[in-house]
Amino acid sequence: MTEPPAPPTPNAVYRLRAARLARAVKPFRTRGGPAERCPVCRVLPSHCLCALRPQVVTHAGMCLLMADIESLKPSNTGWLIADVVADTFAFDWARTSVHPRLLSLLAEPQWQPYVVFPGEYVTPDRVVHALLPTACVTPDRVRPDPCRPLKRPLFVLLDGTWAEAGKMFRKSPYLNHLPVLSLQPDQVSNYRLRRSIHSNHFCTSEVGALCLALAGEVRAAEVLAAYLDVFTYHYLQAKNQQPLDWASPAHLRLRQACARVDSVSTGAENVMMKAPISYF
């Protein structure tokens, strides 16, 4: 009899959530009732997707600056970035304080941080639409090219509602010296777990995928986008009390995306996917 896959290592957002719950003065109640959820993937246990978690080795890093209860919300997609991108860091945001580790991270010489935010809300001198020459773009490579600059792109994503993200941007003076990366995608958001009146507002995971593609890590971006599809499918099937189809288009897309990353591996393991052999 085949042993079930081991549960994945808790990611940065999981650890942040645990710390947030430890200091909570009252229980956090999810919308829709107190249904039991997997503590790792946040979906009902019957629809758990932990065994499908892909992790990609990327040159780019992600820094999630999360609004107060964002890490507690089951529909949050910053979790997916932390699942997929190994070098993901997560911090709670507060108006009156900043975590010392966040300041240290932003100052590390290996990183070139970018605050990802719409350029129309920023003075033009701070806005960039592509990575700076000091950043190393590595198209689907595990290791940076030694002939390229050494700085790695670190994308600072403001994870919360649109109103919360705007407040975080305006009231975080320690971000004021950083370039603002203004994305200009030619598609609309496909996110279906929360509503927005603006089609050009993207969920955090979609923004992460756009950043990875901009950094030349197109296949990692494809994996993250496919993983969002699988999470959305599992989440909605659970919400609507419907069984899973393990041969669904979302699962097929994730399998294909992971296979493409494997096909360009350069000696190191580029993607790890914990799944039963009979998954597809």
Image: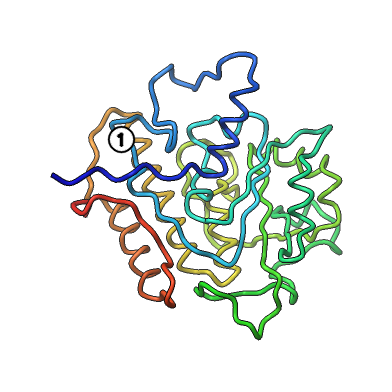
Q: Identify whether 86 is placed above or below 17.
A: below
Q: Residue at x 43, y 33 (%)?
A: 42
Q: Residue at x 67, y 30 (%)?
A: 68
100 or 197: nearer the viewer: 100
Q: Nearer the viewer, residue 142 or 182?
A: 142
Is 211 positioned to the left or the right of 245 in the image?
right
Percent x, y for residue 265? 41, 74
Residue assigned mark 1 = 47
Which colour scheme appears in the figure? Answer: rainbow
Q: Secondary structure at mark 1?
A: helix
Q: Residue at x 71, y 53 (%)?
A: 117
Q: How many badges with numbers are in the image?
A: 1
Q: In this picture, is 66 found above or below 20?
A: below
Residue 122, by quadrant, is bottom right
Question: Looking at the rendering, in which quadrant would you find the N terminus?
Answer: top left
Pick out the residue farthest to the top. Answer: 26
Q: Amino acid at mark 1?
A: His
Q: Label 1 crowding class (10 Å Cα cut-off): few <14, some 14-19, many 20+? A: many
Q: Residue furthest bottom?
A: 147
Say if 78 sits above or below 128 in the image: above
Q: Is 93 placed left or right of 175 in the picture?
A: left
Residue furthest left in the image: 1
Where is residue 121 shown, x and y percent of the image?
Answer: 79, 51
Q: Position of residue 48 (x, y in %)?
A: 33, 37
Q: Nearer the viewer, residue 120 or 76?
A: 76
Residue at coordinates 67% horizontally, 82% vertically from top-left? Answer: 148
Residue 164 lies, in percent from the top left, at 70, 36
- Quadrant in which residue 132 is drawn: bottom right
Q: Is residue 222 above or below residue 150?
A: above
Asked if residue 129 lies left or right of residue 42, the reply is right
Image quadrant for the C terminus?
A: bottom left
